[in-house]
Image (cartoon, grey):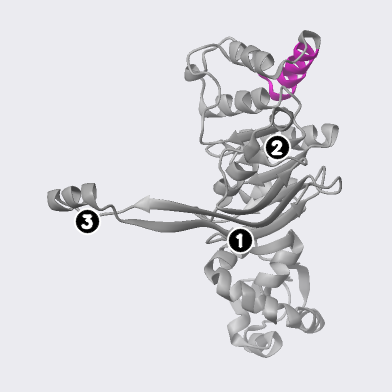
């Protein structure tokens, strides 16, 4: 398979299996393992396929151990797959061609990539030398990144003296100095406070809009995904469970909607009529003072809402989808077998 101009990333039946040693505890078992080592195979990625178009920002979701980071390491060339075909920007990543390395970056929120004991600006200058960025372009890019991420006070500090939030801002800036065309972002906002998360998200959105870069993002913070990604891939136990937009994910995996009714304080008492109007006692989540909260099958939402509006003195009504975090939990709880059953239906 060769990359096509229509797709920045192509993945076909990607598999990565680790062979890990195992033995019982104790001295005798340790001695036996010197003669006959026991191993077992651990599939990290189990035959996933997807494409990412140029300029697209795609969320890559899954619980810990699902295979997200392994996939990103294969795409960035850090790992060889066990089998399958992969291209990124028309290159086979693990061949580590210079033309590919100059056009991509991998940012890992849990890994330090800047030199620990030297000032940030010296790490930036090291990146300039590695990527052979012309001096004038380098100064312009550093100035732009410093302004966008408010790094002026950090440039002359050793990386080891920075807080986690400060270090992540510098990591992002340093990884983008060479203006990569594809970004692999693995938990870029992990451990950051809400304000810093928002700042990093805004910067990533600004960068991709200006440069047209293709981005594959993993994050446990759904605010990152909702703010940046129109499309998501959901992986679990190394298998791809879903590929589509967020709205479609909610529709597929959450069969209910929430209805919140605020009643007029001066209206008549409704206690004796609630269950009849709602349609099923199981749909009533709570009835506190002048507020009703219902969890209704989405196929019944319109009928229930119409019935309540026609028979109650309503001050306000809200019909909403469940929080995306809750939907993702349902996806992970369902697992590959249940997800495939939904596809069959």
Q: Is residue 212 visible?
A: yes
Mark 2 falls on what kind of element? strand
C-alpha span from label 1 to label 2 = 23 Å
Nearer-N-terminus badge (2/3) = 3
Q: Residue sitting at 75 percent across and 63 percent down?
A: 247
Q: Residue sitting at 75 percent across and 52 percent down?
A: 1
Mark 1 falls on what kind of element? strand
Residue 141 at what x, y percent from top left?
A: 77, 18
Q: Is residue 46 left or right of residue 225?
A: left
Which residue occupies the foreground of this view, 187 or 43? 43
Q: Residues within 10 Å of mark 1 (few under 14, many from 20)?
A: some
Specify the quadrant of the image occupied by residue 137: top right
Q: Residues within 10 Å of mark 2 (few under 14, many from 20)?
A: many
Which residues, given as a range, are shown in magenta?
137-151
Q: Residues within 10 Å of mark 3 (few under 14, many from 20)?
A: few
Q: Main secondary structure of the magenta part?
A: helix
Which of the two marks, 1 or 2, is nearer to us in this view? 1
Which residue matches tag 1?
47
Q: Is residue 172 left or right of residue 210?
A: left
Which residue matches tag 2?
183
Mark 3 falls on what kind of element? loop
């Amino acid at each position: 398979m060769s990359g096509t101009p229509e797709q920045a990333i192509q993945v076909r039946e990607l598999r990565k299996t680790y062979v890990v040693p195992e033995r019982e505890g104790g001295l005798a078992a340790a001695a036996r393992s010197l003669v006959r080592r026991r191993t077992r195979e651990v599939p990290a990625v189990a035959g996933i396929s997807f494409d990412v178009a140029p300029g697209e920002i795609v969320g890559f979701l899954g619980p810990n151990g699902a295979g997200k980071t392994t996939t990103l390491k294969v795409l960035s060339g850090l790992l060889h797959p066990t089998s399958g075909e992969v291209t990124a920007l028309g290159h086979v990543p693990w061949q580590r061609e210079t033309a590919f390395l100059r056009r991509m970056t991998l940012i890992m929120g849990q890994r330090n990539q800047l030199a620990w004991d030297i000032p940030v600006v010296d790490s930036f200058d090291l990146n300039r030398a590695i990527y052979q960025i012309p001096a004038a372009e380098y100064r312009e890019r550093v100035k732009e990144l410093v302004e966008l991420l408010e790094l002026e006070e950090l440039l002359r500090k050793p990386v080891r003296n920075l807080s986690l939030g400060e270090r992540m801002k510098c990591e992002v800036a340093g990884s983008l100095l060479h203006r990569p065309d594809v970004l692999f972002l693995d938990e870029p906002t992990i451990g950051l406070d809400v304000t810093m998360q928002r700042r990093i998200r805004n910067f990533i959105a600004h960068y991709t809009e200006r440069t047209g870069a293709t981005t594959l993002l993993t994050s446990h913070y759904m605010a990152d995904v909702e703010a940046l990604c129109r499309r998501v891939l959901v992986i679990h136990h190394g298998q791809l469970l879903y590929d589509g937009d967020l709205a479609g994910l909610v529709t597929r995996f959450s069969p209910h909607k929430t209805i919140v009714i605020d009643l007029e304080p001066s209206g008549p008492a409704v206690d004796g009529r609630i269950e009849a109007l709602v349609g099923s006692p199981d749909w009533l989540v709570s009835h506190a003072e002048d507020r009703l909260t219902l969890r209704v099958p989405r196929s019944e939402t319109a009928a229930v809402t119409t019935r309540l509006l026609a028979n109650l003195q309503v001050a306000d009504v809200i019909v909403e989808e469940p929080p995306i975090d809750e939907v993702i939990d349902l996806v992970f709880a369902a697992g590959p077998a249940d997800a495939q059953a939904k596809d069959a239906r």
